[in-house]
């Protein structure tokens, strides 16, 4: 089972006087790249929330947003005049508009309102943690569903590569015969006496140089290993990426040794399928 790194999760909890909303969005990335936005009053809890997100998502470019909207008169909320004025000035630099409209926009931005309080309410923070847990469940469900789509695509392309490899196996005897005939013709065209024993030795050396038996076996093993890894319980995009590299190495070697147009055409098709796998592999967790 594989997971995509692309996903979205959102969970909302309504308290008697507040509405807590958490949104998490993730895209593909080689490592964990987490951007967190939250009210300044909760910054002291940022490291703890980051750790929870990292444990839940592991990898990806992640945007985490925590919104807390007051829906009752529970606190002495005040307009943060300095922040609002700065927002309005920045908005003026971007687009023209009357002060009333700019004020409405500025008041919706983070930290436009400030609340006087000494410490974070323990019950409220527990609710935030629970909300985060639910949002992580939602985004992981999204990732799993996206991963299922990727898995079907990978299996289809691996099956196509296995079919192309079977065709390579089928025409390999023809290729070896063609190589023999080509060498015989080259020697005949020289119109000179040739030591047959020496010629046979050179022919064997030449055929061994272009033998692809090992590459065919290794490629078949890599394709099987790729499928086995996809079907494992854990999603491991990096491991699948390494296997893809090994698959590519064997395909390239077969192509360089082929020296036979029909086989080289099959190799081109194999490279095309593998390239599509590698493109999608960037999204796998």
Image (cartoon, grey):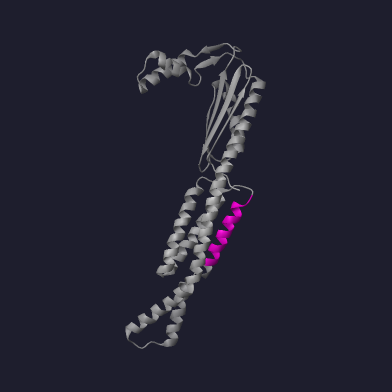
Residue 8 lies in the magenta stretch:
no
* Residue located at (42% from left, 64% from top): 265
Determine the image quadrant of residue 85: top left
What percent of the width, then of the height, locates residue 40? 54, 21
Residue at 53% across, 52% down: 154
Main SS, magenta region, reads: helix
Q: Nearer the viewer, residue 170 or 81?
A: 170
Give the residue displayed 58% in from the left and 16% down from the top: 71
Q: Please say whether residue 248 is visible from this viewpoint.
A: yes
Give left or right: position of 47 versus 250. Answer: right
Residue 112 placement, left or right of 2: left
Q: Count the numbered circles shown.
A: 0
Looking at the rendering, in which quadrant would you find the C terminus? Answer: top right
Residue 48's x, y, as percent?
61, 30
Location of residue 142 (image quadrant): top right
Is there any visible trace of residue 215 in the rendered image? no
Residue at position x 41%, y 17% in the image: 88
Residue 224, position as x, y percentages in the image: 58, 59
Report if residue 221 lies within the magenta region.
Answer: yes
Is 97 drawn above or below residue 229 in the view shown? above
List x then y, in percent, for residue 210: 45, 72
Up-down: is 225 above or below 1?
A: below
Is residue 159 placed above or below 188 in the rendered structure? above
Left or right: 123 as drawn, with respect to 213: right
Is 45 located above or below residue 221 in the figure?
Answer: above
Range of the magenta residues? 216-232
């Amino acid at each position: 089972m594989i997971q995509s790194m692309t996903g979205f999760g959102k969970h909302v909890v309504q308290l008697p006087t507040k509405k807590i909303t958490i949104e998490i969005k993730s895209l593909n990335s080689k490592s964990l790249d987490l951007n967190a936005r939250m009210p300044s009053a909760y910054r002291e809890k940022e490291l703890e929330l980051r750790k929870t997100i990292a444990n839940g998502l592991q990898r990806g470019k992640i945007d985490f947003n925590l919104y807390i909207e007051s829906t009752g008169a529970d606190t002495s909320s005040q307009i943060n005049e300095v922040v609002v004025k700065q927002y309005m000035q920045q908005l003026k630099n971007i687009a023209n508009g009357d002060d009333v409209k700019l004020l409405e926009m500025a008041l919706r931005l983070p930290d436009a309102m400030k609340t006087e309080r000494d410490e974070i309410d323990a019950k409220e923070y527990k609710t935030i943690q629970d909300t985060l847990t639910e949002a992580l469940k939602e985004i992981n469900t999204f990732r799993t569903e996206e991963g299922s789509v990727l898995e079907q695509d990978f299996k289809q392309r691996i099956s196509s590569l296995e079919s192309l490899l079977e065709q390579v196996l089928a025409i390999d005897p023809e290729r070896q015969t063609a190589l023999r005939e080509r060498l015989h013709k080259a020697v005949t065209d020289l119109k000179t006496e040739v030591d047959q024993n020496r010629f046979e030795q050179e022919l064997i050396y030449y055929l061994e140089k272009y033998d692809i038996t090992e590459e065919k076996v290794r490629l078949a093993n890599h394709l099987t290993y790729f499928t086995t890894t996809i079907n494992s319980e854990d999603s491991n995009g990096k491991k699948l990426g390494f296997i893809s590299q090994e698959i590519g190495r064997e395909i390239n070697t077969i192509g360089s040794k082929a020296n036979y147009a029909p086989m080289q055409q099959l190799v081109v098709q194999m490279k095309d399928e593998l390239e599509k796998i590698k493109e999608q592999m960037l999204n796998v967790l």
